[in-house]
Image: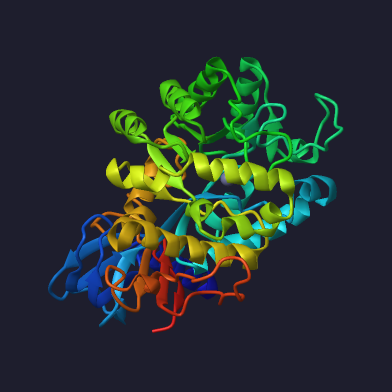
Amino acid sequence: MKYVFLASALTLTASVTFANDEAPLPQTIFANVDIFNGTENKLYENHYVLVEGNKIKTISPSEITARNDAKIIDGSGKTLTPGFIENHAHLMLMGPSLPAMEAGSTWEDFAIHATRMAEMYLMQGFTTVRDAGGANGGLRRAIDAGDIIGPRYYPSGAFLSTRGGHADFANFSAPVGTESNFGRLNLAQEVDSVAEVKKYGRNNFRMGATQLKYMQSGGVVSAFDPWQLLAGSPEELAAAVAVAESYGSYVMAHSYRKEAILGALEAGVKSIEHGFAFDCEIAEIMNEKGAYITTNLTAFDPGLMDIPSIKNVPSSYRKAKSASETFKGYIPNMKKCPVKRGFQTDCVGSVDDCNIQIAYEKKLNHDFFGPFESMKTLTSIGGEISTLTGDFTNPYPEAKLGVIEEGAYADILLLDGNPLEDFSVVGTGDKWFGADKRPDSPETIKLIMKDGVIYKNTL
Ligand SMILES: [Zn+2]
């Protein structure tokens, strides 16, 4: 009898305790930090930031009172910035070439590579990554469940591409309609009619995509397509946009030629990828329609023609040469007629090689556009792009990304210096091909917090 009584008394006490106060959200205070908020060309010096749970609760020039158990981080001399946002990656695609992946990869190869890429991206300071083709919902589920380490993740499902288009990764002799390795795993799908665009577009959302990726132009190193290709009719493009909009989301289109970009904007595409024929007429339409561009500036690197996959393949070399001559106006036009520009690396390859390319892409942003524009591109513009996914498909709809604001998600970096004066503190690299292996995380990124959780702290 005695035991029964005790047990029930304990149960009662316990339930009262929990009913009165739910477990309080963990608090972290960043003290004495200089804040870059993602949107303004200045730092807010010696400020205090209180993170509660996974959001920024308070920002203040004076000390903030918090609970006794709050974690205090002294950020003296450090710059607090939003976590970086990558708008165009391919975490699944390990290379070395598309035919090699098609012929010799299982789902395990893709999954293992993507797991390592996800962790590498977070450790380079990217708390959000949009995947531009080749990834479904599984990686995001594993990251968000905390099973593996990685950034917030916006996958596009399978690339949608016409037969012979930029994401036709089938073997050269594969007859029309043959299943490919990429098709079986829903990494790339061949779509050649309005009906197929609808079917595979819907399948992508079913598989966990947060937006669609349509390959509207050709490429330089791909096998079957001139870069000038105009793939997909206006009706097919419009069908992709309609499917995406039925999920509250949007289409990102791989578009090179002016005709391609104008066609995409006309169809309602919201994110122009590469957009190499960019000019002031396009800028005007983009701004009118609220569209974005993402730029892989390595395409304009002086050393581009020395890359082995271009230098050693005559057809690719010819294509690269004609493309770079045609796209001479890209950077000058973008300076003359600015549009909202997101960060893009577009790396397909090993984790070490992509780490190098990311660091170099950061540097090129600074070289071409200066520190403030580059910081905006890395943060608040990416945050705006993430909202295009729309509330009911967006996996992270509760708060803003890419800004330091009260109420925003607590995705935060502490940098060892002021990136508006010394951009190298974001983790830039001076060399692309032939560069040495880079550290797992840049020394100058002292702290990485995503969703209120600290993944790196070397303070
Ligand atoms: Zn890409």
**411 to 292, vertically: above or below:** below
Number of numbered discs overlaid on the protein picture: 0
Q: Residue at x 47, y 40 (%)?
A: 276
Name the image quarter holding residue 271: top left
Residue 136 in view in this figure: no
Along the horizontal axis of the image, is 129 left or right of 400?
right
Residue 94, image x and y in percent? 70, 56
Along the horizontal axis of the image, is 456 left or right of 115?
left
Residue 168, image x and y in percent? 72, 34
Q: Nearer the viewer, residue 37 or 436?
A: 436
**361 to 454, vertically: above or below:** above
Q: Nearer the viewer, residue 47 or 274?
A: 274
Name the image quarter holding residue 14: bottom left
Name the image quarter holding residue 418: bottom left
Q: Residue at x 47, y 23 (%)?
A: 263
Q: Which quadrant of the picture is home to ligand 1?
A: top right
Along the horizontal axis of the image, is 326 left or right of 83?
right
Residue 262 in view in this figure: yes
Q: Nearer the viewer, residue 251 or 369?
A: 369
Please identify the quadrant where the C terminus is shown: bottom left
**80 to 393, vertically: above or below:** below
Here the colouring is rainbow
Residue 46, image x and y in percent? 18, 76
